[in-house]
């Protein structure tokens, strides 16, 4: 994890589908330059009154899911905190919350990566100025990525059925 200073600003991403608040079951596939994230999207069934639960797993078919491709990735993390320990995230006091997606402006993590890279003989700090620090917070985990950009698409299926498409998105 990284440490933040007073410059980090958390901004909600409006054009990203809401992950399932119960079982998003995120899956990450990555190589050195790209990362693909898949997760179930929140869907309320017509007529649902909130008194029952529907159990899904990675093989449950015909579910709404999102595929997010991150390009030009410099680094990514996937793991804690979950929704019950979210107050332990260094950006939780800046508006970061569970079950949402965010961009961190003037990110300490990006600035730290730039400083780390500054020893490279061909270091170009401006390369880091265009980077984005993106966070997806889920029920049981949090995904963070420093990348050049990302795109999102939605489809229906299962997390398992999305794996071949995720592999294609790495190419």
Image (cartoon, grey):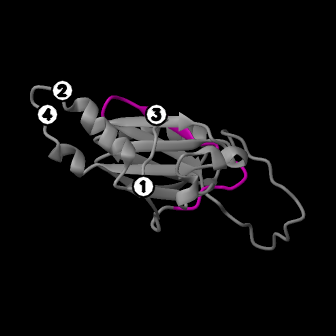
CA–CA distance in space, label 3 to label 4: 28 Å
Residue nearest the viewer, comparing 138 with 116: 116
CA–CA distance in space, label 1 to label 3: 32 Å
Check the image and report above or below for 17 versus 87: below
Residue nearest the viewer, comparing 3 with 145: 3
Residue 83 is situated, as x and y percent measured from the top left of the image, at 69, 49
The disc at residue 119 is 2
Q: Which residue is mark 1?
A: 6
Residues tagged 3 and 4 counted as in contact (Cβ below 8 A): no
Q: Which residue is mark 3?
A: 29
Residues tagged 2 and 4 counted as in contact (Cβ below 8 A): yes
Number of other residues with Cα within 10 Å of mark 3, as a class: few under 14, some 14 to 19, many 20 or more: some
Q: Residue at x 74, y 46 (%)?
A: 56
Dot 1 falls on a residue whose secondary structure is loop
**SS assignment for the magenta stretch, majority:** loop
Segment tinted magenta in the rendering: 17-33
Number of other residues with Cα within 10 Å of mark 4, as a class: few under 14, some 14 to 19, many 20 or more: few
Check the image and report above or below for 23 versus 164: below
């Amino acid at each position: 994890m990284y440490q933040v200073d007073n410059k980090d600003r958390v901004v909600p991403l409006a054009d990203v589908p809401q992950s399932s608040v119960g079982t998003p079951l995120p899956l990450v596939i990555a190589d050195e330059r790209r990362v693909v994230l898949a997760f179930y999207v929140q869907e309320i069934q017509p007529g649902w009154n909130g008194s029952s639960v529907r159990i899904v797993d990675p093989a449950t078919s015909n579910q709404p899911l999102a595929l997010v491709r991150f390009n030009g990735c410099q680094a990514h993390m996937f793991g804690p905190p979950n929704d019950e320990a979210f107050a332990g995230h260094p950006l939780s006091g800046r508006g970061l919350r569970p079950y949402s997606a965010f961009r961190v402006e003037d990110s300490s993590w990006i600035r730290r990566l730039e400083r780390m890279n500054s020893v490279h003989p061909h270091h170009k700090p401006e390369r880091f100025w265009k980077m984005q620090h993106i966070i997806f917070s889920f029920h049981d985990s949090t995904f963070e990525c420093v990348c050049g950009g990302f795109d999102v698409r939605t489809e229906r299926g299962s997390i398992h059925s999305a794996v071949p498409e995720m592999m294609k998105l790495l190419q």
